[in-house]
């Protein structure tokens, strides 16, 4: 017994069938894809092409939106990079980083920690960091994004730590040496998520690490 799959395979294997039986096209009707009357195969093909066209338009619009968003982020990273280059010392570089991340990137909570470096400053950036957290950061091969589950991470943000629902942790590496970490945090669980891209976060970390090693030697 011939079934619908047999018919489909036959038509695929015999593309000249409708050339040999062209008059069939004038008498074949199929259901309208959205219900209602039956329509000819030609009309159905036109509807299918229109639906595909709309799908492609949506995908193109999405690609354009992503491109515009990436351009905007790229411009912000560029501005931060220029400001870090112009900063006349570590304190100024840190102020630049905090200011740009808060204002340009709208990150509500930012923490920087620097280790194994001598500093004239006694700011919070040089406060001791739990070895568990240092080890977790050192093990990262790319920025971590997701829930605030890294050990002792919430402690970096003081009283706000208990309310944080998502974080981005960026290892600060100069050459092959770990110099510290950059942590961004939010009360919004969707702000930093596991599947998000980390290209620009990595670049932020590279620029900040370069500024730290330049100013601390």
Image (cartoon, rainbow, N blue to C red):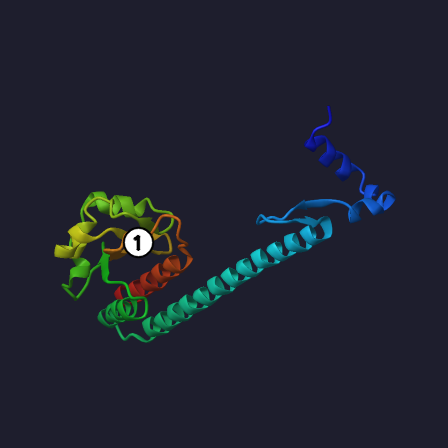
Between 193 and 75, the one lying in front of the other is 193
> Relative to the observer, which residue lies in front, 116 or 96?
96
Quarter of the image holding residue 8? top right
Quadrant position of the C terminus in the picture = bottom left
Q: Residue at x 57, y 61 (%)?
A: 57
Residue 173 sits in which quadrant?
A: bottom left
86 sits left or right of 7 in the view: left
Classify mark 1: helix, strand or loop.
Answer: strand
Give the farthest residue toward the left: 159
Quadrant (top left/top right/bottom left/bottom right) for the N terminus: top right
Counting from the top left corner in percent of width and height, residue 197 is at 41, 54
Q: Which residue is mark 1?
A: 168
Callout count:
1
Q: Is residue 41 left or right of residue 66?
A: right
Residue 209 placement (x, y as % from top left):
32, 61
Give neighbour class at mark 1: few <14, some 14-19, many 20+ (Cα, 10 Å). many
Side of 2 where 173 appears, left or right: left
């Amino acid at each position: 017994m011939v079934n619908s799959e047999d018919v489909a395979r036959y038509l695929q294997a015999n593309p000249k069938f409708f050339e040999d039986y062209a008059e069939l096209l004038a008498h074949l009707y199929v259901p309208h894809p959205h219900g209602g009357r039956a329509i000819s195969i030609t009309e159905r093909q036109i509807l299918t092409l229109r639906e595909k066209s709309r799908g492609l338009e949506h995908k193109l619009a999405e690609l354009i939106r992503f491109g515009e968003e990436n351009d905007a982020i790229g411009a912000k990273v560029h501005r931060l990079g220029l400001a870090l280059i112009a900063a006349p010392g570590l304190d100024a570089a840190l102020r630049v980083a905090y200011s740009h991340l808060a204002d340009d990137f709208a990150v509500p909570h930012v923490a920087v920690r620097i280790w194994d470096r001598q500093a004239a400053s006694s700011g919070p950036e040089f406060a001791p960091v739990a070895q568990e957290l240092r080890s977790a950061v050192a093990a990262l091969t790319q920025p971590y994004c997701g829930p605030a589950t890294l050990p002792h991470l919430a402690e970096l943000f003081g009283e706000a730590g208990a309310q944080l629902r998502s974080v981005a942790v960026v290892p600060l590496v100069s050459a092959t040496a770990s110099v510290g970490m950059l942590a961004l945090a939010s009360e919004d669980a969707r702000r930093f998520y596991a599947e998000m891209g980390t290209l620009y976060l990595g670049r932020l970390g590279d620029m900040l690490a370069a500024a730290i090693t330049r100013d601390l030697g």
